[in-house]
Image (tube, grey):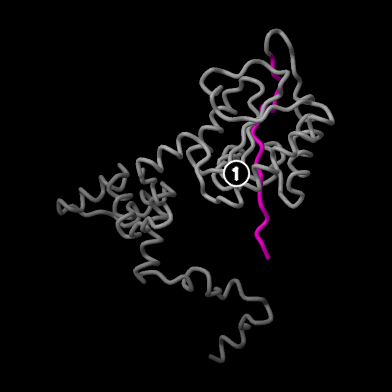
Amino acid sequence: MLKEKTCFVVMAIGDQEYNGKAITAQDLKSKYDDLIKEAILKASPEISVVRADDISLPGSISSDILTHLMHADYVIADVTYPNPNVYYELGLRHASRPGTIIIRDSSGPKVPFDISHLRHFEYENTATGLKSLASNLKAYFDLSVKNPGRPDNQFLELAKLTKYEFPNYIDEPEEDPVITAIMSLITNPDTAGLLVKAGSGQEVNQAEMLSAIFQNPTVGQNLLKAMLATGHLDQGEIFGKQSQKGLPSRNRPSTSQKRRR
């Protein structure tokens, strides 16, 4: 079964204003639902289309947006209104991967000089405009299927020409949990002070050290990970064994049973 293609739409979402003219968030939402999204689905009926305010996953909306910019098969950026968020997200996508389409309403303000040279499709907010936009999008989708990975913006073209090496986070080795734990201990002022004290031959109270460690959740977490990784702590010791107090009453030894033992 083929993986479902995804398309993330970048556009102004909140109320906008240019040349004294106000465009409400509802106007933009209607344009997205009735024109842009419809055109995308006409061009590729099986594609999954999402806009920032469609994202319902819990967590930071910014993280969701970045994830879609990095991983969506296609990003369609509507640059009709001069919006810094749209320009920023367009730049991030251009630097991430190909599969980016720029569109704008032909009745909107003039495109800023810095992006005016970028290829884009103009559309009209009419039935004919929807049909024309769908046709242009389909042509782009078909071309990208035939030429997967082909640079579609100046940044990626230059990166390919100069053989620019992007960071490879997939093959990045995992940090040694022991080293991470040690660094946490020596960079935390409370635990570092106690370590210096112990190193100079002074007696350090164990309870004081444990208190200093677990006052900082990160230090405590890193230490536990290191102990688990090196076998100094067994997960069964933490989660697998029930105390007598926690046993159900029918399994808990009675007073008479304890005496017989």
User: Going 30% across and 42% down the picture, which residue do you hit?
Assistant: 189
**Magenta segment includes 2:** yes
Residue 245 is situated, as x and y percent measured from the top left of the image, at 58, 72
User: Going 30% across and 48% down the picture, which residue do you hit?
Assistant: 191
Which one is in front, 106 or 246?
A: 106
Which one is in front, 31 or 121?
A: 121
| Residue 24, image quadrant | top right
Relative to 167, does residue 230 appear above or below in the rendering? Answer: below
Where does label 1 land, which residue?
68
**Magenta segment includes 130:** no
Q: Furthest residue to the left?
A: 200
Residue 114 is situated, as x and y percent measured from the top left of the image, at 51, 21
User: Going 56% across and 76% down the picture, which residue do you hit?
Assistant: 244
Q: Furthest residue to the bottom?
A: 260
User: Going 25% across and 45% down the picture, which residue do you hit?
Assistant: 193
| Residue 135, image quadrant | top right
| Residue 89, image quadrant | top right
Q: Furthest residue to the top?
A: 20
Element type at marker 1?
Answer: helix
Local packing at callout 1 (Cα closer than 10 Å; few below 14, some 14-19, many 20+) is many
Residue 195 is situated, as x and y percent measured from the top left of the image, at 24, 51
User: Which quarter of the image is occupied by the N terminus?
Assistant: bottom right
Relative to 13, does residue 135 appear above or below in the rendering? Answer: below
Q: Is residue 202 left or right of residue 226?
A: left
Q: Amino acid at mark 1?
A: His
Q: Furthest residue to the right?
A: 127
Relative to 119, does residue 54 appear above or below in the rendering? Answer: below
Which one is in front, 179 or 193?
A: 179
Residue 169 is situated, as x and y percent measured from the top left of the image, at 41, 52
**Magenta highlight range:** 1-17
